Image (spheres, rainbow, N blue to C red):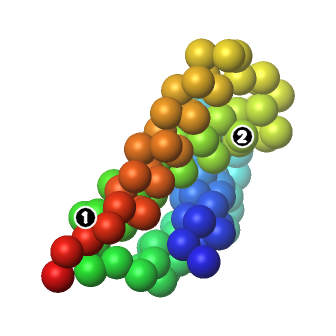
């Protein structure tokens, strides 16, 4: 369940941050901050659900998923298609996150 939780957390974080971006940079209503804050709270809660013996390791692995999800947001929400270098970079990040998540750990 770790990958689905990370994907949901990434979407919540990106949506929450975008709400602030919309208010601050796109001159949207301050009411955008209400769902933005709720989304950021959901992000923190979801990330805390990840099974890990150390928060830092969970956050590090999440970073790779966040990068890939950000490129999905770029394409779907902002209408900018990621180029091949974006996709190669995201693949490298997901590979790195998978190494962190799936590596055998000694007791």
From the viewer's side, name the closer residue of 68 and 107.
107
From the viewer's side, name the closer residue of 96 and 104.
104
Above or below, 68 relative to 82: below
Q: Residue 5: horizontal and vertical position, in percent?
A: 59, 72
Residue underneath mark 2: 72
Q: Quadrant of the N terminus?
A: bottom right
Q: Residue 100: horizontal and vertical position, in percent?
A: 36, 56
Question: Label 1, label 2: how many angstroms apart (C-alpha)?
Answer: 25 Å
Question: Which numbered disc, 1 or 2, marks the residue that appears first in the sequence?
Answer: 1
Q: Residue 42: horizontal and vertical position, in percent?
A: 56, 76
From the viewer's side, name the closer residue of 50 and 24.
50
Q: Quadrant of the C terminus?
A: bottom left
Q: Residue at x 57, y 35 (%)?
A: 91
Give the left or right position of residue 18, taking residue 96 as reference: right
From the viewer's side, name the closer residue of 28 and 18.
18
Q: Residues within 10 Å of mark 1 (few under 14, many from 20)?
A: few
Q: Is residue 16 visible?
A: no
Above or below, 100 relative to 71: below
Q: Residue at x 60, y 16 (%)?
A: 85
Residue underneath mark 1: 56
Residue 76, located in which quarter of the rendered image? top right
Q: Residue at x 59, y 65 (%)?
A: 3
Q: Is residue 88 visible?
A: yes
């Amino acid at each position: 369940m770790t990958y689905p939780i990370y994907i949901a957390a990434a979407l919540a974080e990106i949506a929450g941050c975008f709400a602030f971006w919309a208010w601050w940079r796109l001159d949207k209503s301050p009411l955008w901050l209400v769902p933005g804050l709720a989304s950021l709270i959901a992000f923190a809660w979801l990330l805390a659900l990840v099974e890990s013996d150390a928060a830092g390791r969970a956050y590090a692995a999440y970073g790779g998923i966040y990068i890939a999800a950000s490129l999905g947001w770029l394409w779907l929400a902002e209408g900018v298609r990621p180029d091949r270098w974006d996709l190669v970079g995201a693949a490298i990040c997901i590979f790195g996150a998978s190494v962190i998540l799936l590596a055998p750990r000694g007791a």
